[in-house]
Image: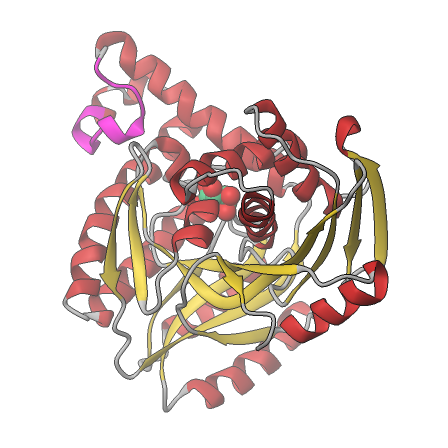
Amino acid sequence: MIKKITNIFFEKFSTQPEVFRSPGRINILGEHTDYNEGFVLPAAIDKNIYVAISKRPDSEVHLFACDFNEQFVTNIYQIKPAQKQWPNYILGVVDQLQKNGHQVGGFNLVLDGDIPIGAGLSSSAAVECATLFGLNAVFDLGLTKIQMAPLAQKAEHVYAGVHCGIMDQFASLFGKKEHAIKLDCRNLHYEYIPANMGNYKIILFNSNVKHNLASSEYNTRRKQCEEGVAIISQNNPLVKSLRDVDMNMLNKYAALLDPVVFKRCKYVVQENERLLGACQDLKLSDLQALGIKMYETHEGLRKDYEVSCKELDFLVNYVKAIPSVAGARMVGGGFGGCSINLIHKEAVDKIISEISAAYETAMGLTLTTYQVTIEDGTAACNINN
Ligand code: GLA
């Protein structure tokens, strides 16, 4: 991948670039909790976005996306959202750098990667983080990773229109081999928890659907949670987010809350509590207990948060009865993308072949599967490798 991107870069721009990579992520537990100032438990995976970058002597910005075989040209003094989607993840980062007073000159950038797009594995956050990390190095901007995370998140808000939390960008930047990151999204304090999978493998089933209400419904969920907090905080001024609410308190306000808002809040409060237990399970390598919590999370996302879809429900239900699967659930924002499964290594091949056939019969869709490992976060690449 590094050789390929360097060669393409050289063909286009006749110079050697610097190359950077940023990974996709999985999330073991803690879904839709990040923008509620809760906890998440993501990890970076062995699938990456790569960017090759060099400075230009002029103020032009030349971008090339290998996947689409498409070029996009603009000027550093005229950064604005593009019609096409892919340049926006790069331009959004440049825009944020400029708004924060950082000097970025003209540059060439080639984009490539092996994170499946639209699979809920945060390829967009990986593009943002690789670009930001790369521009920071090339233009010597002096940003630390902890400063980069909110900046990349803001780029997504402004240029992609999704009011995402901080999880994806943080996980991509801060991933650590064989560890999950327990992140407190209230203050960005984090702890690495060894993710010892023993005889189990992390297998992703890509439903290969991405229902197009994903981003509008995402923003709606965020508003519904805020609506719940606004009502509860009228009588409890110390409540700033759902992080400050437990089930006792929530139940007291049930009558004042719209029933849909109540369900949304209930899921988030329960998920935060569940996450603390999941961290213990992981520390003890108790994958059975962790797996049960993953199924519970899926149920909450399906019934109360209503961000699943029939394809993901099919995939999770299918494995639920199989003893060699410790747990499964949808991963990421929802409405399509992947389910994450903890499967005993001896059973992986058999389960993949059975569920692929069953999925095709039931949904008329092809299932794509990936075995992933947990790897380090954003870094510069050695182009001689
Ligand atoms: C998307 C967002 C994240 C997070 C998840 C749901 O991936 O980008 O910030 O909210 O959905 O947990």
Magenta highlight range = 238-249
Q: Is residue 104 covered in magenta? A: no
Could you tell me which residue is drawn at 70 percent across and 38 percent down? Answer: 91
Could you tell me which residue is drawn at 67 percent across and 75 percent down? Answer: 3
Asked if residue 163 can be seen in this view, the reply is no
Q: In this rendered view, identify the residue nearer to me: 156 or 380.
A: 380
- For the rendered model, the colour scheme is secondary structure
Q: In this rendered view, identify the residue nearer to me: 279 or 137.
A: 137
Is residue 306 shown above or below 254?
A: below
Is residue 224 shown above or below 142?
A: above
Is residue 75 shown above or below 301?
A: above
Provide residue 145's location: percent of width, then percent of height.
Answer: 42, 44
Provide residue 291's location: percent of width, then percent of height.
Answer: 29, 66
Provide residue 155's location: percent of width, then percent of height.
Answer: 59, 34
Could you tell me which residue is drawn at 19 percent across and 24 percent down? Answer: 249
Q: In this rendered view, identify the residue nearer to me: 303 or 243.
A: 243
Q: Quadrant of residue 159?
A: top right
Q: Is residue 246 covered in magenta? A: yes
The quadrant the N terminus occupies is bottom right
Asked if residue 153 can be seen in this view, the reply is yes
Could you tell me which residue is drawn at 45 percent across and 49 percent down? Answer: 302
Q: Is residue 232 left or right of residue 64?
A: left
